[in-house]
Image (tube, rainbow, N blue to C red):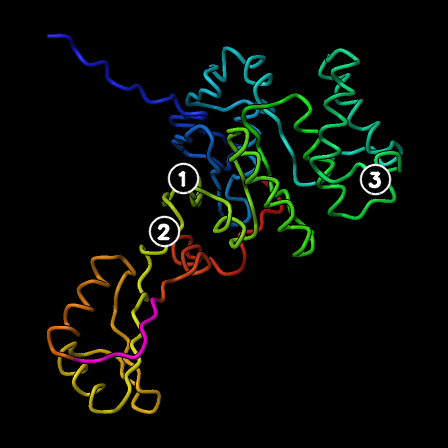
Amino acid sequence: MVATPTATLAPPAISARGLRKSYGDKTVLDGIDLDIPQGSVFALLGPNGAGKTTTVEILSTLVSADGGTARIAGHDLAREPAGVRSAIGVTGQFAAVDGLLTAEENLLLMADLRHLPRREGRRRAAALLERFELTEVAGKPVTAFSGGMRRKLDLAMTLVGDPRIIFLDEPTTGLDPRSRRTLWGIIRGLVADQGVTVFLTTQYLEEADHLADRIAVLDRGGIVAEGTADELKRLIPGGHIRLRFPDPDQLRAAVRHFGAVAADPEELTLRVPGDGSIPTLRAVLDVLDGASIHAESLTVHTPDLDDVFLTLTGRTGSPKETSR
């Protein structure tokens, strides 16, 4: 009998085990583990000083870890830092563009730093200017650019080297909502069209909810939760299914069948606790059908990422990180 070959899973773009880092007597990372699949967006959330930026600095070879191991794009972080750097791009919290140069000159400078042949550098610069809708301002000095245009150019410069993994450390800080959503579209396009892996830290919980395939919450040096946005939201109590009924008789019948739940006789609504999952929803519908109770509408309410963040970290305020 001929054995059927088994499919092999692609190795993760980023994997880390037991990463540790301290500054003096302050422990910033206390043994974190990460596994980030290729071609995905991973978001790291955490309160001020939780270690988000330090994590990016370690994984991008900017600082060394005190302990633990990591592999980036198949390269050992400690033994093959040059291989890691050749596979990644990094966009920091503030646009690293030269305001005295034009957009095109900034991109060509990056191409020179990447030791690209002149013709190839010009080709990539032109392609990136077009992709980021900067062609019309290619010859203008960056000092004349808006914040959104600067961030787009900054990300374009990161892509000059055609990285397979991009670290974005709070890339939309200070942008207006329209510019932020434009950048979101560009990031998703990089993943969908080119299979790029994005490691994102952000102070905007909506941003993580919109972009990330998986999210990890970092607090007090450790990962306190990880999963999809929906999985994290289901960890937090307060989710419910809201039923609206056509008349008081239907509402009273529903209250008898669902027991101690929150009913609003004026609004003719009933709140049934639930995690928003399909099995929970199906169970509620089965009760209604079995008792011949008619509901006019049904809506599912789950906690948002603000609730997740505040509950898991036990902090108030946003997760904006002003130091490390």
Identify which amino acid the numbered label 3 is placed on: Glu
Q: 90 left or right of 30?
A: right
Q: Is residue 8 left or right of residue 254?
A: right
**Residue to which mark 2 is pinned:** 232
Between marks 1 and 2 in the image, the one whose residue lies nearer the viewer: 2
Q: Which mark is residue 247?
A: none
Percent position (x, y) of residue 296?
30, 79
User: Residue 222 bears which disc, if any?
Assistant: 1
Query: For the residue carrying disc 3, how many other residues have a C-alpha within 10 Å: few (<14), some (14-19), or many (20+)?
Result: few
Check whether the beta carbons of the residues at disc 3 and disc 1 lie within 8 A of each other: no
Q: CA–CA distance between discs 3 and 2?
A: 43 Å
Three-letter amino acid code of the residue under disc 2: Leu
Secondary structure beneath dot 3 equals helix
Residue 74: quarter of image: top left
- Crowdedness near tag 1: few (<14), some (14–19) or many (≥20) residues, C-alpha within 10 Å: many
Instruction: State the CA–CA distance, disc 3 to disc 1.
Output: 46 Å
**Mark whose residue sits in front, 3 or 1:** 3
Give residue 63's position: percent from left, percent from top.
58, 24
Label 1 vs 2, first from the N-terminus: 1
| Residue 295: in magenta span | yes
Residue 4, image x, y percentages? 19, 14
Question: Which mark, residue 136?
Answer: 3
Q: Is residue 283 above or below residue 66?
A: below
Q: Label 1, label 2: how many angstroms apart (C-alpha)? A: 16 Å
Quadrant of the image containing the C terminus: top right
Q: Quadrant of the N terminus?
A: top left
- 120 shown above or below 280: above
